[in-house]
Image (spheres, grey):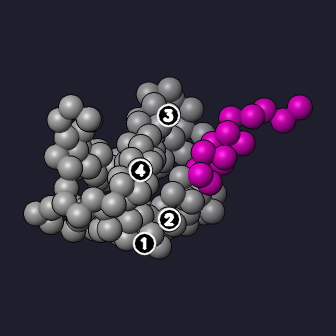
Amino acid sequence: MSETNKEKLRNSIDAIESGYEFMLAYAAQGRDFEYTGGGDGPSVRVYLEDMKTGLELVADNFVNVVSDTDTSGAEFSDFIEILKSDAEKSQVAVKMVLSLPSIGSQVIDNLNATIHVRALLTDLFLIDEALTSLSRKPQ
């Protein structure tokens, strides 16, 4: 596997996972109005924008990594379609939240709970394990 392609995939996954982790903490704060950053750290919008970018790239980055392996089975192609769909649906939800004039904790809590975001995170966990398995040499 190309180190460059693996790094690009890792960056897109990290952006999504970091956004999700930040959203969990943000949702727990019980904010009625958006915290816009400043001395206490970045705004929720910074994480959502990074997450949106990761969602835009993750499926293509996974395709590139899979192309670097000896795996050409239909199973990977079929899963890539699922990943694309889950990423697109999650991205739509993130874009809708970003369009709001103020992002409170409750809306973030609801975004975290959407089946689309949860399915995408599970996809990412599966990708991580699959790639680890592909990189192991049978003994």
At mark 1, the secondary structure is: loop
Question: Which numbered disc, 1 or 3, marks the residue closer to the eye?
Answer: 1
Quarter assignment of residue 27: bottom left
Q: Is residue 63 visible?
A: yes
Q: Is the Cβ of the residue at disc 1 closer than 8 Å to that at disc 3? A: no
C-alpha gap between disc 1 and disc 2: 6 Å
Q: CA distance from mark 3 to mark 4?
A: 28 Å
Which of pointers 3 and 4 lies earlier in the amino acid sequence?
3
Nearer the N terminus, badge 1 or badge 3? Answer: 3
> What is the secondary structure assignment of the residue under circle 3?
helix
Secondary structure beneath dot 4 equals helix
> Seen from this angle, which residue lies furthest left?
101
| Structural distance between the alpha carbons of marks 2 and 3 | 23 Å
Callout 1–callout 2 Cβ contact below 8 Å: yes
Rounded to the nearest angstrom, the CA distance separating label 2 from label 4 is 16 Å
Is the C-beta separation of discs 4 and 1 under 8 Å? no
Give the residue pinned by disc 3. Answer: 6
For disc 1, the marked residue is 114
Q: In the shown orientation, is residue 21 left or right of residue 105?
A: right
Part of the protein shown in magenta:
125-139
Q: Residue at x 27, y 59 (%)?
A: 31
